[in-house]
Amino acid sequence: MYQYDQYDHLIVRERIAQYRDQVRRRLADELTEAEFVPLRLQNGLYMQRHAYMLRIAVPYGLLASKQMRMFAHIARKYDRGYGHFTTRQNIQFNWVELEQTPDILTDLASVEMHAIQTSGNCIRNTTSDPYAGVAADEIIDPRPYAEVLRQWSTFHPEFIALPRKFKVAINGAVEDRAAIAIHDIGLTVVRNEAGEIGFKFMAGGGMGRTPIIGSVIRDFLPWQHLLTYTEAVMRVYNQHGRRDNKYKARIKILLKALGVEEFTRQVEAEWVDLKDGPETLTIEEMQRVIDYFQPPAYKQLDDSDVVAAQAGNKAFANWVNRNVKPHKQPGYAAVVLSLKKTGVPPGDATAEQMDFMADLADRYSFGELRVTHEQNVVLADVEQSQLFALWQEAKAHGLATPNIGLLTDMICCPGGDFCSLANAKSLPIAAAISERFDNLDFQHDIGEIELNISGCINACGHHHVGSIGVLGVDKDGSEWYQVSIGGAQGNNAAIGKIIGPSFSALQMPEVIDRLLKVYLRERFEDESFADCAQRLGVAPFKEFVYATPIAEKGGRLVGEDEYV
Ligand code: HEM
Ligand code: SF4
């Protein structure tokens, strides 16, 4: 994995020193809150409903075990004993004290991490495939390119005051596991007919108020031009993106307003001056970065049938089927540790679990972990012969729920329990649905489905691209939930369609149940919920869900008010 050089160390240390002084001045009232806000946001510190929230970047999701242990330390020492992994390969701590934040950043710097550019109108953490480097369907490891982009974009003087935040995702495999189509820039590493490496370049995707799937603006960009072309795109956006209206400021709106052809024409015109200039990548520079991502010292092994070796162990077989993923290297597998146990907010991990995951990484996976955009954690390099032992240990720590890709593996934002922008709570909805559909056999029968929940239109929970999307809305001061179906992420990304009037919190589990009933009734063999919903359209789902009134059972949602 990438290691800081002397410049990285210096930059991060200098930034903390500046910030420490800014916090001191704020506490001494030498800075007003208005003066302090942009300074703290540049260091990932938000003010939320109850407390400050610190967002820390995990570049392309890759973590060393010592970095995971540092998260555990921060959770324990400065927070309430847990942290929240997000959809953009970040972690958020929800209960930090302002005066302690410089110390947290100092602790983080000791393991080569920081919170720079996790907020504000700059280029944010570049995200990638959590199986990068190991996926059986990988064309090229995208991480060195993500790292080059990270180095180039961090503190880029021209792009620190963009019209709006800017998110880049990069994928190097046949299957898109980085949700590239809903990013401002989405890159796919491809080979052309001559075998040369380049990028399929997408731009203008995003969710929020106006969800839009990105457009391909170049089918093949040779790798040498990654930075110059990205710079051309950024310049067009920086110059013409709307700064007069926050809601129309993202690149997706510009691209839509201009049309793909005109947008591309402007980018290409801008590129004329940049192409082959000093930012052109050389083989030497690329190789220097690629060297950081060399594969670990794999043993020469053969693939083994781990399920057959544990004949009759249904629980283990279930876990292998759901949580174990194929690996390039014979005899190895990638393992997803589920952070979606019923009764726990999706993406949350306790300090104890973080320490434990770090231990597992050291013992089973060359000391590395990955954060997924579905809010789980991956051990990428596990020997197949060790899977049974690993499963038993993970199970004992609540990290082996065999639900990856299933209904309860839902994405959910922090919503009204923490977030000051929320229109409604989202965690209690997730908890109530998990509780209702806890039955794993039923979940396995339903098969792969993405249930995504956001507490407001900002779409942090990716509701637009959920097979079922739930969006919290405010109606006359009370909390309601709007449901959409047929969204999808990945290669066939699509925005879901709203089925009709919104529901109360207490109706939500029954709404999901009714949607599933229609799906189970209508599906073709092996047809996913998203495909089925896209084929049938909203009508049959709508008809059944609204056919009879839904009682508000129970009076109180599971988990309600438990997160504050
Ligand atoms: C409580 C802390 C949070 C705050 C204040 C916050 C704030 C925001 C805001 C203002 C937007 C809309 C920006 C725009 O589209 O113009 C947004 C979008 C988004 N946020 Fe958050 N967020 C928070 C937590 C999270 C969490 C926990 C996740 C992951 C689970 C997340 C992931 C995202 C994603 C994926 C988007 C979609 C934007 C897009 O690219 O179209 N955020 N957030
Ligand atoms: S979707 Fe809304 S409520 Fe949820 S975290 Fe994002 S900004 Fe907050």
Image: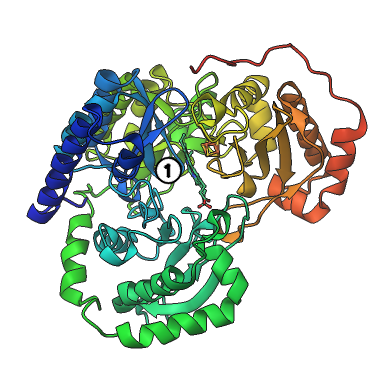
Question: Residue 194, relative to residue 347: is it above or below?
Answer: below
Percent coordinates x, y for residue 418 in the rendering: 49, 27
| Residue closer to the observer: 183 or 390 | 183
* Numbered circles on residues, count: 1
Asked if ligand 1 lies within 8 A of label 1, the reply is: no
Percent coordinates x, y for residue 272 in the rendering: 36, 88
- The structure residue drawn at horizontal position 17% and vertical position 35%, both measured from the top left corner, is 20
Q: How is the image coloured?
A: rainbow
- The structure residue drawn at horizontal position 32% and vertical position 76%, both measured from the top left corner, is 228
| Residue closer to the observer: 154 or 474 | 474
Looking at the rendering, which quadrant does residue 479 occupy? top right
Percent coordinates x, y for residue 506 in the rendering: 73, 21
- The structure residue drawn at horizontal position 62% and vertical position 26%, both measured from the top left corner, is 440
- The structure residue drawn at horizontal position 35% and vertical position 18%, both measured from the top left corner, is 80
The amino acid pointed to by label 1 is Thr
Percent coordinates x, y for residue 378 in the rendering: 38, 39
Question: Residue 212, relative to residue 13: is it above or below?
Answer: below
Looking at the rendering, which quadrant does residue 386 occupy? top left
Neighbour tally class for label 1: few under 14, some 14-19, many 20 plus, Cα within 10 Å: many
Question: Residue 192, relative to residue 66: is it above or below?
Answer: below
Most extreme residue toward the left, as rendered?
Answer: 6
Q: In the visual, does 246 lie left or right of 114?
A: right
Question: Residue 211, relative to residue 54: is it above or below?
Answer: below
Can you see residue 538?
A: yes
Q: What element carries label 1?
A: loop
| Residue closer to the observer: 490 or 394 | 490
Task: Please give the residue where the numbered disc 1 appears in the rendered image.
Answer: 372
Q: In the visual, does 113 lie left or right of 457?
A: left
Most extreme residue toward the right, as rendered?
Answer: 547
